[in-house]
């Protein structure tokens, strides 16, 4: 006779943990949150030689971790992003956390080609009148 297991009782047989790029990346980021993309790529390629893993993939994983969509093992947190540029349309913060004034941007002209041609013709006519 087979022995029936009670509900909630753990299974004796555990499935082997699949090795994935995601697991490798998360493990390495937990060990060293500032790991270089080239170093991580070498580690990934050892297990997945045909992988196209690169710095953009690492940036995506870090972004997902910072957003909270993916958690690092052991509750490790990533340091703040080291982006040098500032996001468009957002107010910049100085070192003390105070908001700085937003820099106004020049608006791009939305003239059509016909309007531009007409403006050039008018300028040409005006210069002819001044000469004559």
Image: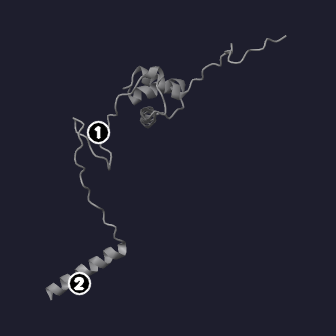
**Residue most extreme to the left:** 131
Tell me where residue 106 appears, x and y as whole percent. 26, 59
Numbered tag placed on residue 125 in the rendering: 2
Q: Residue at x 43, y 25 (%)?
A: 29
In the image, which is nearer the foreground, mark 1 or mark 2? Answer: 1
> Vertically, is 16 above or below 57?
above
Question: Hey, which residue is sitting farthest right in the picture?
Answer: 1
Find the distance from the CA under tag 1 to the CA under tag 2: 49 Å
Disc 2: CA contacts within 10 A as few (<14), some (14-19) or many (>=20): few
State the mark number for residue 84: 1
Q: Secondary structure at mark 2?
A: helix
Residue 17 or 67: which is nearer the viewer? 67
Q: Position of residue 81 (x, y in %)?
A: 34, 34
Of helix, strand and loop, which one carries label 1?
loop
Q: Position of residue 36 (x, y in %)?
A: 38, 28
- Using the image as rendered, state which of residue 100 and residue 64 is in the foreground: 100
86 relative to 7, above or below: below
In this image, 3 relative to 87: left or right? right
Against 13, is 60 above or below?
below
Q: Nearer the viewer, residue 7 or 50?
A: 7
The residue sitting at 36% across, 71% down in the picture is 112
Seen at 38% across and 27% down, the residue is 78
Question: Within the image, what quadrant is residue 66 found in?
Answer: top left
Compare marks 1 and 2 and give the one earlier in the sequence: 1
């Amino acid at each position: 006779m087979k022995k029936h297991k009670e509900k909630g009782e753990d299974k004796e047989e555990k499935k082997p943990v699949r090795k994935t790029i995601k697991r490798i990346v998360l493990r390495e980021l937990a060990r060293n949150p500032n790991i270089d993309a080239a170093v991580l790529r070498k580690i990934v390629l050892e297990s997945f030689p045909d992988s196209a893993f690169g710095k953009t993939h690492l940036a995506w994983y870090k972004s997902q971790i910072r957003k909270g969509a993916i958690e690092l093992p052991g509750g490790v947190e990533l340091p703040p992003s080291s982006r040098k540029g500032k996001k468009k349309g957002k107010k910049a913060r100085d070192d003390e956390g105070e908001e700085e004034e937003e820099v106004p941007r020049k608006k791009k002209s939305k003239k059509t080609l016909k309007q531009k041609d007409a403006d050039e013709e008018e300028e040409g006519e005006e210069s002819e009148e001044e000469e004559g």
